[in-house]
Image: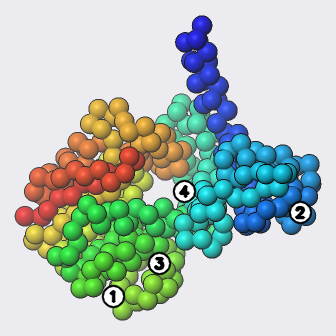
Amino acid sequence: MSELHEFTGKISEMANAFRQSRILFAAHDHNVFAFLEEDRGADDVAQRIGCSVRGTTMLLDGLVALDLVTKHGGRYRNGPVATTCLVPGKPAYQGAILRHTQRSWDAWSRLSEAVRTGTGVKQGSHRPATGELRDFILGMSNIAFLSAPDLLEHIDIAPFKHLLDVGGGPGTYTITFLKANPRLRATIMDLPPVIEIARDQVAVAGLEERVAYRPGDCTADDLGSGYDLILVSNIVHILSADQNARLVRKCHDALESGGTLIIKDFLTDPDRSGPAFSLIFALHMLLHTEAGGTYSIEEVRRWTDDAGFLPGELKSLTPKTRLWAAQKG
């Protein structure tokens, strides 16, 4: 019977996991965490966020259950995770990526249909509205804020002089690389509305003189030339396998001899048995792209081999993310 309890408990935990994310989203919607940097009663919080005392009390208790908020003597206060990641203005604030993730709620409710049809996206529906696009791009910055410095621990960028950041988004990787290598200059390539967001971020970093911009679609437009380092970070999962193979060939053409291509993504094991995040993220791409998915290490190896790169090297960046680095001969 103990095994049955364990099995049924696991199923119950998975089936009800949505409750935890919904609690987090509701608290973020109402800006609860901004008011809990000091001890407050539920009635005080309710007044500040314009909600009922009854609903606010239950929500705050739910946050206590999630270990995001502490409760002592009937008064509530942010715990370490909430203080670090959920208070606006903090360096590790995750607000933009939370809003982006929350917008996936309805799409994920249609997963059964997407599995049946093989697509969850109507033609053109992957083009987000302006506010959604900004949340998505700045959400990528919320994530890259930590992952970009981690990447520098695995790749020595000191020898490089000119970086092409393909699909560079908010420019977080570019900014991090430029700060780490004063000799490096960079070109960010992305769609025109995204380039405008990147310009703002680069300006805040004070690096305008070292960054050029190439508005365009990396699957359709020329990448330019003269680069000795190309970064393709979290792009290949948006595209089909054929699109990625063509993009890798374009990167090979754009690189100088001896230059390096870095592909950073949620690459799976060769037999697609893991990592778990990558396998689940493939379903996210089923719902949100026309042909995207997560790809195996062996698929990426074929792309670079077929494009003419020297044998590549795999590096594990995080439990979710892997790097594939290949040099042009």
Distance from disc 1 to disc 3, alpha carbons, whole Å, reads 13 Å
Disc number lying in front (3 or 2): 2
Q: Is residue 247 above or below residue 74?
A: below
In the rendering, at what x and y percent does residue 79 appear? 66, 56
Give the SS element for disc 4.
loop
In the rendering, at what x and y percent does residue 131 appear? 64, 69
Distance from disc 1 to disc 4, alpha carbons, whole Å, reads 32 Å
What amino acid is labelled 3 in the image? Answer: Ala
The residue that disc 1 covers is 210
What amino acid is labelled 4 in the image? Answer: His
Disc number lying in front (2 or 4): 2
- Left or right relative to 280: residue 244: left
Taking the view exactly as shown, the residue that stands out farthest to the bottom is 209
Give the SS element for disc 2.
helix
The residue that disc 4 covers is 126
| 2 or 1: tag closer to the N-terminus | 2
| 1 or 3: tag closer to the N-terminus | 3
Give the label on residue 196, or none: none
Disc number lying in front (2 or 1): 2
Q: Is the Cβ of the residue at disc 3 closer than 8 Å to that at disc 2?
A: no
The residue that disc 2 covers is 44
| 3 or 2: tag closer to the N-terminus | 2
Answer few, some or many: residues within 10 Å of disc 4's Cα (few below 14, many 20 plus, some between 14 and 19).
few
Distance from disc 3 to disc 2, alpha carbons, whole Å, reads 39 Å
Disc number lying in front (3 or 4): 3
